[in-house]
Every structure is written in structure tokens, then in C-alpha cells.
Image (spheres, grey):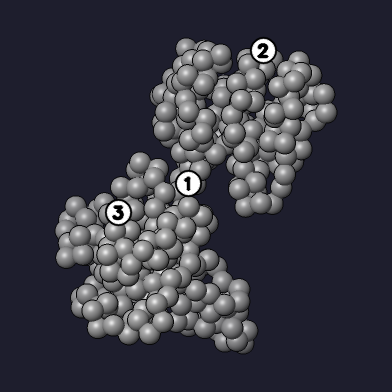
Amino acid sequence: MESCLGALLPLLARERAAGRASALAVLLSTVGSTYQRPGTLLLIAANGEYAGLLSGGCLEGDLAEHARAVIDSGAARRVTYDLRDPNDLVWGLGAGCEGAMHVLLLRVGPLEHWQPLAHFAEAFATHTPTAVGLIAESHDARLALGTVMLPNDATETLGAAARTALASASRSAEPGWFEQPGHCRLFLLPLALPPRVLVLGAGPDAPPLVRLAAELQWKVTVLDHRPALAVPARFPAAERVIQARPQALLESVDPSTFDAAVVMTHQLETDREYLRALSATTLPYIGLLGPPARAARLLGELAAQAAALRERLHAPVGLDLGGRSPEAIAVSIVAEILAFRHGRLKAAAPSG
């Protein structure tokens, strides 16, 4: 599941600072072809401004109308959009999505202690997996539609089974359902954390990669041994910029906290030392910039350590999109990491 919380945080911070309640739209379920998947979020301010997307923009205006009622009353509501008739021109826009979606709208403001977004924002800042429950159907007068269940709340109210279900959603980052027949249905909404990427090399082709990754809300750490390049001002979008020798990589960062690493120093010896250090980690994705012959040479020099890299190494790093500029290379690398995270490709390390 793609992270969508980051796009909501600036609007949330603004409305929260002003003490104004907003409405949170949560995509509960879909049928057929739809723009987004269940678990996607949309935050709508009282003035109709919104952050995030549930559709290509054709439904957000109508949702804003529902949001005003939710903000005013505090009562959550469910809204269904059924676009499965290909001849139905939705509000004259001709969306043609041919799918249906069920959306839950709930107020997020001072009276709700800004939940569940306050909980998510804190976990997002510390990169901590979590999940909350939302009452999507209820036959219990004590549990109103839209009631937010934080992990401990769910345990106290619904029992240990709900806690287990929330913990599972937190680990998988996939939404789901927990049901107590005749009582309620709880939508399990996990926080989809953005990937953390380690960029090893701060040369001229690294800044575009960091900028593009940051546009996707990814958390990027840049590490380089050269003082003139490992400068935070060159990477304002990076989470951290570290100057350290390749041999000190494992002392400078904890690789287990990253989802991917890209080796791109353009120096054979330095790249070899980074690969040597990464061979001792469990990082699932390791990218290496440069042509196949260069990668094969490096793997040959690593000898026995190369075996620990082959199943994880993508060399040359990036999808073959045909571009040669730093910006085009950045696009290819980000695209490949996305494809890998969604199970669309496997490593293809060169022989050596």
C-alpha cells in the first residue's frame, strides 16, 4: 500500500494550528476499476480545500459537500459512488471508471483530539508501524459509526482478538476488516510508511534522485566520504546527510532500518567497499550504478561476498527507460524501486 499520509500533513497542521475541524475521508472498499485502493485517505478542510485524492478529481467536489455536514454535525457518514455503468456520465464529467467505492467520512478536530490523524502523524514522524480501527458498521448504540479505535482502545472495547487483528494490519501495512457478528465491523486502517532509502554517493547525479524520492514522501539518507559532496545544503530534501568512509558504513547507519540502498559513487574502490559492507546486511534491494561489465568486475573482486549480494543486487540500477541525464536516471531508479516494492521484478545481477 502506498503511503498517502504525507500529502495530508501540511493541511492538517494548518487547520490544527487554527483550531478548525476537518473531515477525513477513508476509502473502505472498492468494486471493479477505481482510481485508488481501500485505505486511501483524503482530508477536507471546512472551506472545501482538500489534500489527497480518492478519484481523479471528479468525486472530491461532491465529497466536500458531505464533509461540510460531517464537520458541522460531528456525525460520521458513509457515501457510495457506483460508476459501473459505462454510459453514465458522472456529473457530466464522463469519468468512465466503471467501478464502485464506499467511503467513510468522519470529523477530525479538537473534540476528537485530532484522531486518528494525530496518532498517525506521531508514528509517521518516528517511522513506527501502526494501525487504527474505524467503526464502519455498528449494531451497538455505544459504538457510533466512525468511532476511532486506537490500538489500546480496540483492545479494551473489543477484546484481544481486535488487538491481534490491528497488529497484523500494522505489520502488513494492508487494510482489512475485523468483525464481531451482530455487534460491529471494524475497518483496520494501517499507516503505510514510506520507504527509507540509503543513497551511497553524493555526486552530481544524486541530488535529482533525492529530490524525486522526496516528492514521493520517501525518507532518504545520503552518505559519502568526500567532504565537498556530503553537504546538507546540497540535499535539502534528505532526512540525513552523513560524511563517513565506506568502511564505516555499518557504524554510521543501521541498514536494517532501510528498505533499499543505491551505490553510486562512480569510484570502483569505494563502490566495492560499500558492496562489501552491504553483503553483510539483509537489505532486500541493493542498486549499483554503472554498466554491466563494471558490476561484473566488482562482484568478481568481492569473491565469496558476491554470493550474498546476487539475489538482491540490481545492476545496472534502474529500469531501462533510455534516458541518460541525471534526472532521467533518477526517474529510472525510483521507478525500479517502486516496481520492486510492488513485486513487479526480481534482482538481475550480472555474472562475475
Task: Name the secondary structure under disc 2.
Answer: helix
**Of pointers 2 and 3, the one earlier in the residue sequence:** 3
Q: Which residue is mark 3?
A: 119
Mark 2 surroundings within 10 Å by alpha-carbon count, few (fewer than 14), some (14 through 19), many (20 or more): few
Q: Residue at x 27, y 77 (%)?
A: 143
Mark 3–mark 1 distance (CA, rounded to whole Å) = 16 Å
Q: The disc labelled 1 sits on which kind of residue?
A: Pro
**Of pointers 1 and 2, the one earlier in the residue sequence:** 1
Q: Residue at x 30, y 54 (%)?
A: 119
Q: Residue 48 appears in which quarter of the rendering? A: bottom left
Q: The disc labelled 2 sits on which kind of residue?
A: Glu
Task: Name the secondary structure under disc 1.
Answer: loop
Q: Which residue is mark 2?
A: 269
Mark 2–mark 3 distance (CA, rounded to whole Å) = 45 Å
Q: How many marks?
A: 3
Q: Residue 200 appears in which quarter of the rendering? A: top right
In this view, the residue farthest toward the front is: 160
Q: The disc labelled 3 sits on which kind of residue?
A: His
Q: Between 298 and 16, which is closer to the camera in this rendering?
A: 298
Question: Is 257 on the left-hand or right-hand side of 349?
Answer: left
Q: Position of residue 144 (x, y in %)?
A: 27, 78
**Of pointers 3 and 1, the one earlier in the residue sequence:** 3
Q: Position of residue 50 (x, y in %)?
A: 35, 63
Q: Residue at x 64, y 33 (%)?
A: 286
Question: Is 56 on the left-hand or right-hand side of 286?
Answer: left
Q: Residue 162 appears in which quarter of the rendering? A: bottom left
Q: Which residue is mark 1?
A: 194
Nearest to viewer (mark 2 / mark 3):
3
